[in-house]
Amino acid sequence: MACMHDHSCEDHDCSSNWSLFKHIDLAKVSALNEAVPGSVKSVFKAWEHRLNSSEGYLESNDGDPELLVFIPFTSDVKIKSISIVGGADGTSPSKMRVFINREGIDFSDAQSMQAVQEWDLAENMQGMLEYQTRYSKFQSVGNITLHFPDNFGGDTSQIHYIGFKGEATQLKRDVVATIVYELMPNPSDHKTKAESGGGFSHVE
């Protein structure tokens, strides 16, 4: 489902609503079928800069509009909606399919796997459309893969901006394993009184 902005961003802090880009692990973002290697990183930016493509944009190889974008986060996030700003002249993606917490997906995987959710997209040149997620399925998102299988008839697909509205849990991904380990009982920390000279036997 696509929603239109129903207010002026001058009166509302839209930038803070779309601040999940600060939690994207940009160095690890990647795309398949991008014409310019690494160009995918240029589409993640602050909301107020969503229409500024001076630093580049993501474009597929000529004659092949399909794109697959992998986005890892530095902390688990909850995603409420997604915004996609595409290119002109039929180069905007016409469909988006999403996979959550699945690494290493290629085109063959994406075409055969069941997406968590998919949307028919509109040509959103001004970035005023957002696509609502089934929020209960977009909790604890460590990484997300966006599959754009087709466009509106252009020879290539272009994406100028990808934005996520939601919130971060503030729990860093690389800290989770440490916390889980520390929550597990360590036998050496739980000696009984018998082992320390007391009157109780060891509890198995």
Image (cartoon, rainbow, N blue to C red):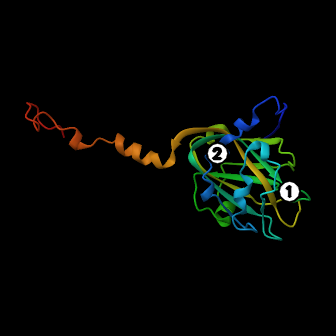
Spatial CA span between label 2 and label 1: 24 Å
User: In the image, which disc is placed on residue 22?
Assistant: 2
Kindly state the secondary structure of the residue where label 2 is placed: helix
156 relative position to 107: left or right: right
Task: Bin the neighbour count of mark 2 within 10 Å (Cα to Cα): few under 14, some 14-19, many 20 and up.
Answer: some
Kindly report which numbered mark, 2 or 1, lies closer to the viewer in this rendering: 2
Looking at the rendering, in which quadrant would you find the N terminus?
Answer: top right
The x and y percentages for residue 153 are 89, 62
Looking at the picture, does residue 166 appear above or below residue 42?
Answer: above
Q: In which quarter of the image is residue 152?
A: bottom right
The amino acid type, in three-letter code, at marker 2 is Lys
127 relative position to 176: left or right: right
Residue for point 92% across, 59% down: 89
Looking at the picture, does residue 66 appear above or below residue 119?
Answer: below
Residue found at the very far right of the displayed protein? 89
The x and y percentages for residue 139 are 59, 40
User: In the image, which disc is placed on residue 87?
Assistant: 1
169 relative position to 177: left or right: right
Residue found at the very far top of the displayed protein? 11
Looking at the rendering, in which quadrant would you find the C terminus?
Answer: top left
Q: Nearer the viewer, residue 197 or 145?
A: 197
Residue for point 61% across, 46% down: 23
The x and y percentages for residue 120 are 80, 49
Residue found at the very far front of the displayed protein? 54
Q: Which of 106 and 182 is in front in this view?
A: 182
Task: Bin the neighbour count of mark 1 within 10 Å (Cα to Cα): few under 14, some 14-19, many 20 and up.
Answer: many
Kindly state the secondary structure of the residue where label 1 is placed: loop
Q: In which quarter of the image is residue 64?
A: bottom right
The x and y percentages for residue 135 are 66, 38
The amino acid type, in three-letter code, at marker 1 is Gly
